[in-house]
Amino acid sequence: MFTLAQIESAHSDMESGKNFPAFAKKIKEMGVQTFETFVEDGSTIYKGNDDYEVSGVQQYAPHLIYGIVNPEKFLADLRNHQQGNTDFFQFCKDCADSGIFKWIVDLNAKTCTYYDAEGNHIFEEKIPD
């Protein structure tokens, strides 16, 4: 099975959201099936087969998640991140400012779904090949 060190190594190759599809492919090959990232502190839970999971640690001081979701701002910030204009930290800050609580990536379905603090589905996108 995969280790946190292997995932962190793959993540270190990722300069911005522009490189996310390659990162997703690499960790899927390691055995990661899904992962859940929490905007508040950047921590992530990676899951594989047979309930195997590895948890990543807090990445930064906690962000306050804005209580009202602003989908238009979020989508603009997401597109900006995907074009390589922001790093992970800035993207998470932008998500917090837009009311995004977490995202879940399903590597088998090739989707990334964003949620608010109440668990409401805000946006889902396909991960390109």
Image: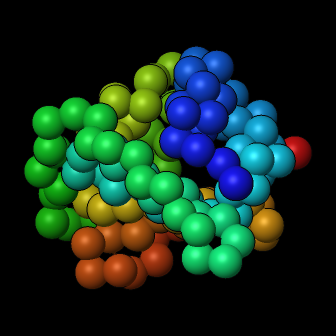
Q: Residue 21 location in percent, x, y?
A: 74, 40
Quarter placement of the N terminus = bottom right
Q: Quadrant of residue 124?
A: bottom right
Res 128 seen here: no
Front residue of this view, candidates 122 and 56: 56
Res 7 seen here: yes
- Residue 14 relative to residue 107: left or right: left
- Residue 91 relative to residue 105: left or right: left
- Residue 44 relative to residue 41: left or right: right
Residue pictured at 39% horizontal, 36% vertical: 91
Residue pictured at 59% horizontal, 38% vertical: 7
Q: How many marks?
A: 0
115 above or below 64?
below
For this orientation, the residue located farthest to the front is 1
Front residue of this view, candidates 18 and 47: 47
Front residue of this view, candidates 116 and 32: 32
Q: Residue 114 location in percent, x, y?
A: 47, 64
Quarter placement of the C terminus = top right
Q: Residue 92 location in percent, x, y?
A: 34, 41
Residue pictured at 62% horizontal, 35% vertical: 6
Residue pictured at 30% horizontal, 62% vertical: 101
Front residue of this view, candidates 26 and 19: 26
Q: Residue 55 location in percent, x, y?
A: 42, 54
